[in-house]
Amino acid sequence: MSFDTLIYENPAPHVARIVLNRPDTRNAQDTHLLYELNDAFDKAAQDNTVKVIILSANGPHFSSGHDLRETNPKEAMAQHRTVGTWCGFECAGAEAQMAREKEIYIGFSERWRNIPKPTIAQIHGKCIAGGLMLAWPCDLIVASDDAMFLDNTVAMGVGGVEYFAHPWEVGIRKAKEMLFAGDWLSAEEALRLGMLNHVVPAATLGDFTLELAKKIAQKPLFALKLAKESVNAAQDAQGRVNAMQTSFAYHQLAHSHNMQVHGMMIDPTGLSPAVAGKPAK
Ligand code: ZN
């Protein structure tokens, strides 16, 4: 299995590392990248010698989010094997967009969240909107001290990114401020809020994350899986899945609304740098 948009490697025994590798686009996620990432996660999940999966990125930033410049997403989807059951990517009206986002956004992110093996996101630079949907599904998040996080999608006329984990990641009050104000979250603040496990100097990020993965990889895999499933069950007992389905339905309503009012899926005012949020100092 070879990939165009990422690198798959085994940097230590029992550790798989998936490296996003579209640095020229700041690892913007087009349809092809997301399907390749899903294939890479599947490869690591189904390799019985792998116990821990690291997700990292090449280039100056972890991910600039969804690739809004993608010209023909339907054609790109047709080149990959559908992994969900909704289908209907060619349907009329709102269903095509809903089907697409059910598959490659909330569907993939939820699928990765439910891989029973421990996963670690290794974040540096900026992690914007769709970037959060790669980081948040991972079990642990290690960030460099220059990492910054942003969901700027309310400015684009939707209620938040499709994988709506904000309340669990940063708490209720900060989730609201993060969405309403659209301000950047620094690594230091994200650590304080419990969204991150560790913040380390940028020069040591890769080594630190790999050492953590190697420590985890010494444990029996079945027990690791049971530990993960147990914590996930506790989180889901808080109503996470139902809440996320509700926000996804609202998200689709917003796309439909924007299409009727603006003739496009998002409110174009959100594309203005002044509205979409600038990096904090
Ligand atoms: Zn959307």
Image (cartoon, grey):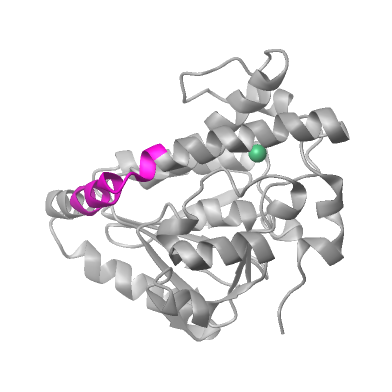
Indicate the position of residue 47 as horizontal and vertical percent values: 30, 42
Indicate the position of residue 125 as horizontal and vertical percent values: 63, 72
Q: Is residue 118 left or right of residue 260?
A: left
Indicate the position of residue 224 as horizontal and vertical percent values: 18, 55
In magenta segment, residue 236: yes
Task: Name the residue: 37% across, 45% down.
Answer: 240
Q: Is residue 90 left or right of residue 208?
A: right
Task: Name the residue: 61% across, 26% down.
Answer: 98
Residue 15 can be seen, yes or no? yes
- Up-down: is 19 above or below 261? below
**Ligand 1 sits in quadrant:** top right
Q: Nearer the viewer, residue 78 or 191?
A: 191
Indicate the position of residue 8 as horizontal and vertical percent values: 48, 51
Region of the chain picked out in magenta, as a range: 229-242
Task: Name the residue: 46% across, 83% down.
Answer: 200
Quarter occupied by residue 45: top left
In magenta segment, residue 275: no
Q: Quadrant of the C terminus?
A: bottom right
